[in-house]
Image (cartoon, rainbow, N blue to C red):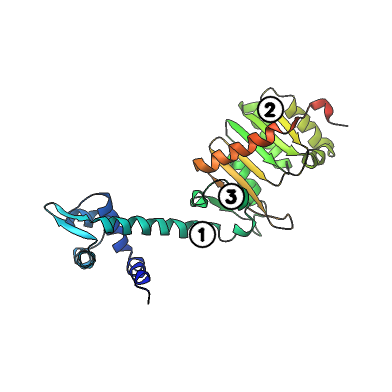
Amino acid sequence: MDLALEEIEFLALSPNRVAVLNALRESSSTRRELEEATGASQPTLGRILRDFDERNWITRTSDGYDVTATGRLIAAGFTDLRKIVETELTLRDIVEWLPTDEMAFDLLALRDATITTPSQTRPGAPVGRVTETIRGANRVRIVSYAFNERSLETVCRNVLEDDQTFEGVFSATAIDALADDSTLRERLRELLEADRAEIRVFDGDVPHAVTVADDVVSLMIRDDDGVLQAALDTDNQHVRMWGEDLHERYWEESDPLEADALEE
């Protein structure tokens, strides 16, 4: 067996080993301090420290134990590997539909993302999740191929009653779909006449459905047939910067929509 894989397995099979190595990576510690920090018993700590000492991952000090340079390297590398695997587990069920070629950030930025999928009892859960991020936000920016009734109603209420600022960029087909419904058309007109709202129309395909609500970025994930599969949201700053840049690019290449342009 590969010796490197054996060492990875040695660490991975014991959460206590990982916890002790990371604790020593943070600061030198006594056995009592390690017990308090990790919850491992003294006999367990004894075995772990002996194993680490045999590998030259730790060294004894006058105050207890400290990591060596290679011990620190192992701890950092294992932490990075764990983050990578956690990210893969988060994205596993939706990665085939993610626009990864257009995401100008490391996928690790999505490690703590929330994934909301539809179910038999809550088929509208993804839309509901994005609506939650919009509700209560001070500023909302959207780039999307669609503007559904639920989002329109939420934005209207927030802009008209709660001083929300709204800047939306939508495909022409998204606006046409609202304009074809008399009730939604009037609601859209009401939004356009508000001082704190502006909508622009992009003349072309809009493959994204990205919402930036204050610090939270949400993506609607569709499959190859255009069926909504999930909503992904995160407050990671790198993803937020990507979402803001995306919105700005579409905003600059779009034309303002005026209320009087909506046909009866």
Q: Secondary structure at mark 1?
A: helix
Q: Quadrant of residue 216?
A: top right
Q: Which mark is residue 197?
A: 2
In the picture of the structure, the residue carrying the numbered disc 1 is 88
Category of crowding for the residue at label 1, using alpha-carbon neighbours closer than 10 angstroms: few (below 14), some (14–19), many (at least 20): some
Q: Amino acid at mark 3?
A: Leu
Tell whether label 2 touches label 1 (CB within 8 Å).
no
Q: Secondary structure at mark 3?
A: strand
| 152, 30: nearer the viewer | 30
In the picture of the structure, the residue carrying the numbered disc 3 is 232
Position of residue 113 measured from the top left corner of the image (x, y, whole percent)? 52, 50
Position of residue 83 measured from the top left corner of the image (x, y, whole percent)? 43, 56
Mark toward the viewer: 3 or 1: 1
| Distance between mark 1 and mark 2 Cα atoms | 38 Å
- Please state, as top left, top right, bottom left or bottom right, where the C terminus lies in the image: top right
Q: Quadrant of residue 144?
A: top right
* Residue visible at 26% across and 55% down in the picture: 69
Mark before the other along the chain sequence, 2 or 3:
2
| 225, 161: nearer the viewer | 225
Residue 134 in view in this figure: no
- Please state, as top left, top right, bottom left or bottom right, where the N terminus lies in the image: bottom left
Q: Quadrant of residue 72?
A: bottom left
Category of crowding for the residue at label 3, using alpha-carbon neighbours closer than 10 angstroms: few (below 14), some (14–19), many (at least 20): many
| Distance between mark 3 and mark 1 Cα atoms | 14 Å
- Residue 195 placement, left or right of 241: right
Position of residue 124 measured from the top left corner of the image (x, y, whole percent)? 67, 51
- Residue 252 placement, left or right of 218: right
Mark before the other along the chain sequence, 1 or 2:
1
Residue 202 in view in this figure: yes
Tell whether label 1 touches label 3 (CB within 8 Å).
no
